[in-house]
Each structure stands twice: as C-alpha cells, then as structure tokens.
Amino acid sequence: QVQLVESGGGLVQAGGSLRLACTTSGRTSSSYHMGWFRQAPGKEREFVAAISRIGDITDYTDSVKGRFTISRDNVKNTVYLQMNSLKPEDTAVYLCVVRMAFTWSPRAGYDYWGQGTQVTVSS
C-alpha cells in the first residue's frame, strides 16, 4: 500500500509559477514510477507529466511542454511539479499518481492516486 499527500496548490495570476509536491509513504519511492494528472470542472481527467523510478525518463503532455518540469527526490520520497508561465486553462485539481509495474508506461496503468490539490490561475 502506498499513501500519497499532495501540497503546493493555490491561486496565482496568469504568467505566475507554482510548485506542487507529492510525498509518498508505505514503500520505497525508487520502486515505482510517478506522475501527475489534472481534472478541470466539466472535463475529463488528463495526463500532465510522468517520471521514471530513478528520474532518468520524463514525459509531458504537449500543452505543458516547456512550461512544466517534473522531478523527484527519492531520499525524501517526493515528486515535484514545477509549473511556470501558468495559464487560466491550467486551472484544475492536480492529482499525484503511482505506478507499481516495472515497465515504463507514462500515461496509463497507475495504481494509486492522491486526493488532489487545487490550482487556480486567474486572468
């Protein structure tokens, strides 16, 4: 069992930055891939970014490439999402995810989901 706790959401003006963090417990974080999804009101949940077990591979959805950076610190069992140049369309609940399978499949197959943290970008 893996527990996830997200933090770092908030209200920011367009063009601003936020850094989300997700701390896990229950298993050694280097034993699983991690990522972020988001869900806006009235929209389907969508993949945002993912990072491999040791942080050597990353993947991003096209709309955040060049603006968002995912990273991890396996000593702290934490994954981060640095979000720069935020846009109103980035407004959503951001959810941290964990994939236990060894294979790299960044956009699907996640086993554990956090409760989410709200990000609101005002225009």
Image (spheres, rainbow, N blue to C red):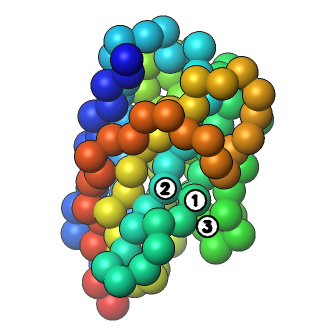
- Looking at marks 1 and 2 on the same chain, the residue that comes earlier in the sequence is marked by 2
Q: What's the CA distance linking mark 1 and mark 3?
A: 10 Å
Q: Where is residue 107 in the image (x, y as percent from the top left)?
A: 66, 51
Position of residue 60 in the picture relative to residue 119 (left or right): right
- Looking at marks 3 and 2 on the same chain, the residue that comes earlier in the sequence is marked by 2
Residue drawn at the location 47% of the way across and 40% of the way down: 97
Q: Where is residue 23 in the image (x, y as percent from the top left)?
A: 35, 27
SS at badge 1: strand
Q: Do the residues labelled 3 and 2 touch (CB within 8 Å)?
A: no
**In the picture, which quadrant includes the N terminus?**
top left
Position of residue 117 in the picture relative to residue 69 (left or right): left
Please say if 106 is above or below 3.
below
Residue neighbourhood size for the residue with mark 1, other residues' Cα within 10 Å, grouped as few (<14), some (14–19), many (≥20): some
SS at badge 3: helix
The residue type indicated by label 2 comes to Phe
Q: Where is residue 73 in the image (x, y as percent from the top left)?
A: 51, 22
Residue drawn at the location 28% of the way across and 34% of the way down: 5
Name the residue tied to disc 3: 64
Name the residue tied to disc 1: 47
Q: Do the residues labelled 1 and 2 touch (CB within 8 Å)?
A: yes
Name the residue tied to disc 2: 37
Q: What's the CA distance linking mark 1 and mark 2?
A: 4 Å
Residue neighbourhood size for the residue with mark 2, other residues' Cα within 10 Å, grouped as few (<14), some (14–19), many (≥20): many
The residue type indicated by label 3 comes to Val
